[in-house]
Image: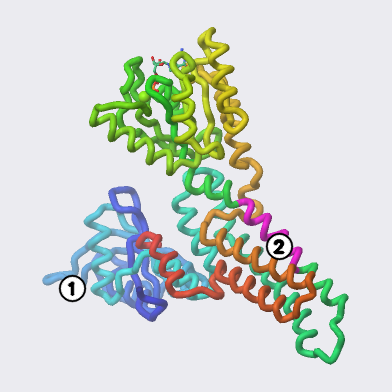
């Protein structure tokens, strides 16, 4: 992987395909002189150092030419060209953006020209990587760029834009500053052992550790909701055949996505759909009914159901009280489900019967499981279900967009490691252990936090972050 070097890099920054406008971006010291070799102000194709002579942060109309074409300069496209001088640019380097028409042949030809005029094809995420190495953004903001691009819901967009604007980085820097002060307080006592340990100073340091601990825990607590906003909740509908799983899938999707019949075994494969339930992004999966069968296709479908169950954040296990309720049914369901993430839904509550069966099923699963009566057909009880899901996943407890929200497992892991190190430090302090133990733990915790902002991070981590980017960003 190439690190920040002096090459001028080029890439198509807009998605492949036809459209109104595409952007080909160049970044690097030589961006202007390279652009000069391929853009003419006049339609006649005259080399006149057009881009170099443009004003800083201006946009002008021009023409892209292939000046190396065998006979005369060949007109490739009409364009608008933006010139941005370092360091006030996305990458902190000289940047040129060529807005051309967005046809595949046009953009690939312009990129090819840029490469022949001296640019190098950019690696995935290399523009943002340069912004990071140029010191314009920290690593947490760089990571947020990809999250903004991928955001599918308002909450995930808000969380990502807030991280991009630096809210997470600023909070981490503020906490690191507090830790540095705590270390300084303690080091005074270590460096001058002839003085008796200043208890007041120690108490201030302990106070700082506790403040940081509290703020880190608040951050850590946002992760569940943050991750759901970013990745979506994996919700799987499972249960015996004919329970009404596909009916529920269709009701939640608002369209007839799955085939519904009263013939058991209609749904033989898993069917996945993305939807927003009251603002919560959900990947919902309808599955083949779980039961004993000799049918080869059904068997494969059921094994897919089992694997979907193991991957789910939330399982809606649907049963029809008309046919469900024997000991065998109950123990099979319990062996498949984890009470922590499963809702047992007794379906067909619109039918005026089966009250005793419903009660029996309720008692067999409650209180370990969250049990509810619903009607997949009429929607009865689904509002209730949705509120319980929100409560279970603490969705709604997090204020997206105003305070930092964790959405990355890397950040969550580092923050949790910092929390346990600081708890250890606080423990050492209150047990009156040698002060270097305390300051050692605080330094380690601070190191973990610096990995979030990229002040203290390995090349592998940086590579793994930028590898997730697309070319052109
Ligand atoms: N009355 C009533 N019938 C339902 C309800 N949910 C599903 N059904 C019916 O039960 C049958 C099986 O439904 P389906 O969704 O295909 O079940 P699946 O095999 O679990 O996917 C169909 O005839 C549905 O119309 C419900 O809430 N109330
Ligand atoms: Mg079905």
In the picture of the structure, the residue carrying the numbered disc 1 is: 68
Residue 40 vs residue 415, the one in the foreground:
415
Q: CA distance from mark 1 to mark 2?
A: 63 Å
In the figure, 104 relative to 183: above or below? Answer: above
- Of residues 225 and 58, the one nearer the viewer is 225
Identify the residue at the far top of this view.
Answer: 352
Q: In the image, is the residue at mark 2 within 8 Å of ligand 1 by its beta carbon?
A: no
Is residue 210 a member of the stretch shown in magenta? yes
What SS does tag 2 mark?
helix
How is this picture coloured? Answer: rainbow
Residue 239 on the magenta span: no
Which residue position holds label 2? 213
Magenta-highlighted residues: 209-222
| Quadrant showing the C terminus | bottom left
Quadrant of the displayed image that contains ligand 1:
top left
Residue beneath the point at 33% across and 27% down: 292
Out of 345 and 247, give the one closest to the viewer: 345
Q: Is residue 447 left or right of residue 348?
A: right
Does residue 210 appear in the picture of this structure?
yes
The percent coordinates of residue 311 (x first, y second) are 43, 44
Q: Residue at x 56, y 20 (%)?
A: 373
User: Closest to the observer: 248 or 100?
Assistant: 248
* Spot occupied by residue 310 in the image (x, y as percentages of width and height): 43, 42
The tag earlier along the polypeptide, 1 or 2, is 1
Crowd class of label 2 (few under 14; some 14 to 19; many from 20; radius 10 Å):
many
The residue at label 1 has a CB less than 8 Å from ligand 2: no
Q: Quick one: SS at disc 1?
A: loop
């Amino acid at each position: 992987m190439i690190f920040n070097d002096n090459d001028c890099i080029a890439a198509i920054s807009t998605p492949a395909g036809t459209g109104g406008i595409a952007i080909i971006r160049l970044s690097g010291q030589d961006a202007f002189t390279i652009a000069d070799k391929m853009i003419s102000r006049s339609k006649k194709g005259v080399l006149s150092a057009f881009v170099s002579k443009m004003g800083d942060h201006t946009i002008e109309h021009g023409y892209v030419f292939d000046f190396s074409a065998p006979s005369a300069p060949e007109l490739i496209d009409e364009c608008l060209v933006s010139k941005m001088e370092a360091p006030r640019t996305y990458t902190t380097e000289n940047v040129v953006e060529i807005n051309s028409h967005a046809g595949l042949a046009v953009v690939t030809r312009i990129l090819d020209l840029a490469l022949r005029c001296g640019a190098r094809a950019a690696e995935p995420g290399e523009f943002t990587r340069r912004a990071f190495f140029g010191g314009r953004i920290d690593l947490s903001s760089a990571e947020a760029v990809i999250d903004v691009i991928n955001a599918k819901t308002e909450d995930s967009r808000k969380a990502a834009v807030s991280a991009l604007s630096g809210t997470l980085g600023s909070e981490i820097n503020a906490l690191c500053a507090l830790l540095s002060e705590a270390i300084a307080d303690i080091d005074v006592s270590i460096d001058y052992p002839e003085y008796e340990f200043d208890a007041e100073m120690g108490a201030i340091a302990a106070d700082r550790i506790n403040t940081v601990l509290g703020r880190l825990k608040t951050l850590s607590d946002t992760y569940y909701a943050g991750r759901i906003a970013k990745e979506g909740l994996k919700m799987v509908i499972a249960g015996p055949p004919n329970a009404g799983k596909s009916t529920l899938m269709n009701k939640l999707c608002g369209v007839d996505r799955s085939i519904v019949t009263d013939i058991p075994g209609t749904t033989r494969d898993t069917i996945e759909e993305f939807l927003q339930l009251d603002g919560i992004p959900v990947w919902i999966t309808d599955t083949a009914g779980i039961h004993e069968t000799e049918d080869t296709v059904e068997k494969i479908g059921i094994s897919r159901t089992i694997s979907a169950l193991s991957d789910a954040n939330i399982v809606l296990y649907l049963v029809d009280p008309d046919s469900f309720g024997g000991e065998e049914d109950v123990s099979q369901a319990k062996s498949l489900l984890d009470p922590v993430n499963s809702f047992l839904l007794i379906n067909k509550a619109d039918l005026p019967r089966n009250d005793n069966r419903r009660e029996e099923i309720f008692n067999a699963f409650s209180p370990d499981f969250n049990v509810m009566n619903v009607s997949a057909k009429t929607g009865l009880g689904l509002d209730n279900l949705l509120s319980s899901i929100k409560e279970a996943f603490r969705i709604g407890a997090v204020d997206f967009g105003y305070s930092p929200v964790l959405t990355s497992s890397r950040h969550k892991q580092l923050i949790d490691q910092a929390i346990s190190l600081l708890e250890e430090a606080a423990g050492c302090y209150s047990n009156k252990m040698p002060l270097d133990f305390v300051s050692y733990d605080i330094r380690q915790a601070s190191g973990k936090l610096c990995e979030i902002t990229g002040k203290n991070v390995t090349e592998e981590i940086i590579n793994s972050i930028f590898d997730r980017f697309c070319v052109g960003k």
